[in-house]
Image (cartoon, rainbow, N blue to C red):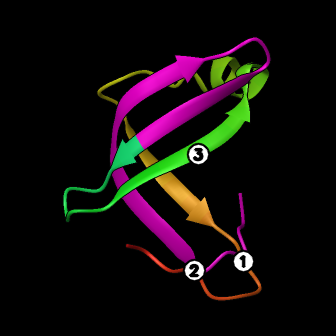
């Protein structure tokens, strides 16, 4: 799969919190950055995302992203 996003951060999934339709997936990159993504429950199931797995947070943005 080819991606045009330039910002890809590898990390470990530390939490998958499923809601009625959307899940929050938290990824720790080990460098002090924790990323939380909101994706559909269907996507979590199709990607077989589990705590402890290695994953990539792919960030595609046309503006500036600030981490605090």
Residue at the spot of label 2 = 65
Q: CA distance from mark 2 to mark 1?
A: 8 Å
Q: Main secondary structure of the magenta part?
A: strand
- The image quadrant of residue 60 is bottom right
Rendering coords of residue 31 (x, y %): 20, 65
The reply to whether callout 3 and callout 2 are in contact (CB within 8 Å) is no
- The image quadrant of residue 12 is top left
Mark 1 residue element: loop
50 versus 33 height, above or below: above
46 with respect to 52 (left or right): right
Range of residues picked out in magenta: 1-26
Q: Which mark is residue 37?
A: 3
Q: Earlier in the sequence, mark 3 or mark 2?
A: 3
Q: CA distance from mark 3 to mark 1?
A: 14 Å
Location of the N terminus (image quadrant)? bottom right
49 with respect to 13 (left or right): right
Rendering coords of residue 63 (x, y %): 72, 88
Q: Earlier in the sequence, mark 3 or mark 1?
A: 3
Residue at the spot of label 1 = 61
The reply to whether callout 2 and callout 1 are in contact (CB within 8 Å) is yes
Mark 3 residue element: strand
> For the point 44% across and 44% down, which residue is it?
55
Location of the C terminus (image quadrant)? bottom left
Number of numbered callouts drawn: 3
Residue extending furthest front? 68
1 versus 68 height, above or below: above
> For the point 72% across and 66% down, which residue is it?
2
Which residue is nearer to you in this view: 17 or 9? Answer: 17
Marks 2, 1: nearer the viewer: 2
Q: CA distance from mark 3 to mark 2?
A: 14 Å
> Dot 2, crowdedness within 10 Å: few (<14), some or many (≥20)?
few
């Amino acid at each position: 799969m080819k991606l045009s996003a330039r910002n890809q951060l590898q990390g470990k999934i530390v939490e998958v919190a499923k809601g009625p339709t959307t899940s929050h997936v938290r990824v720790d990159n080990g460098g002090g950055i924790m990323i939380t993504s909101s994706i559909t429950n269907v996507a979590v199931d199709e990607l077989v995302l589990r705590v402890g797995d290695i994953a990539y947070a792919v960030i595609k943005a046309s503006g500036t992203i600030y981490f605090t």
